[in-house]
Amino acid sequence: MSSAATSADELGEVTVLVYSDDRQVREDVIRTIGRRPAADLPRLEFLQVATEPAVYHHLAKTDIALCILDAEAVPAGGMGIARTMKDEIHNAPPTLLLLARPVDMWLATWSRADAAVAQPIEPAAFVDTVATLLRRTTAVTA
């Protein structure tokens, strides 16, 4: 086994929570990111969540490296969940919002999300944003 493969295996795995009431949105996000968005990052395990209570349940029980939240989810949108996380959870994981429109970026700022992307998602920029947020998390936990 090469040293590059060994070092990649040593990075382990981190969990990314993907929240949307729309299964297709969750699947598209996961497919776009892939299992390892960058060679210097650990492999990703995805936790798909469709309800707000499930988000908080998993945040309390699981070590989450990143939350990707659909701002258009109903009845609870990702913006409100992101703001609640930042207000109520000590050391909340970074949040990435999926927005329906670029003009909603100001709302992402209100929600205190760490990053936001507007749809349609540009895959390379999206994966780069995910990798940047994960590097912050993995640097803290390493």
Image (cartoon, rainbow, N blue to C red):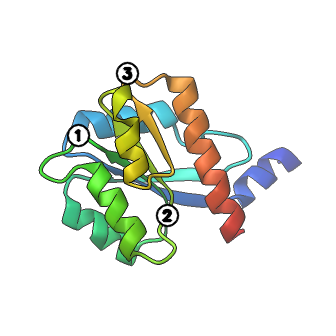
Disc assigned to residue 14: none
How far, Cα to Cα, is label 1 from label 2?
A: 20 Å
Residue at x-position 28% and y-position 43%: 71
Residue neighbourhood size for the residue with mark 1, other residues' Cα within 10 Å, grouped as few (<14), some (14–19), many (≥20): some
Residue 37 point in image, percent of width and height: 60, 39
Q: Is residue 100 visible?
A: yes
The residue furthest left is 75
Q: Amino acid at mark 3?
A: Pro
Q: Is residue 79 left or right of residue 2?
A: left
Dots 1 and 2: beta carbons under 8 Å?
no
Q: Provide the residue designation for mark 2.
A: 93
Q: Quadrant of residue 141?
A: bottom right
Task: Identify which residue, 7 or 77, lies in the foreground.
Answer: 77
Please, what secondary structure does the residue beneath circle 3 have? loop
**Height in image: 85 above or below 100?**
below
Q: Secondary structure at mark 1?
A: loop
- Residue 22: percent from left, percent from top: 20, 39
Residue nearest the viewer, comparing 50 with 46: 50
Work out whether mark 1 precedes mark 3 in sequence or the reverse, and give the earlier one.
1
Which numbered marker is on residue 120?
3
Say which amino acid is labelled 1: Glu
How many numbered dots are placed on residues in this image?
A: 3
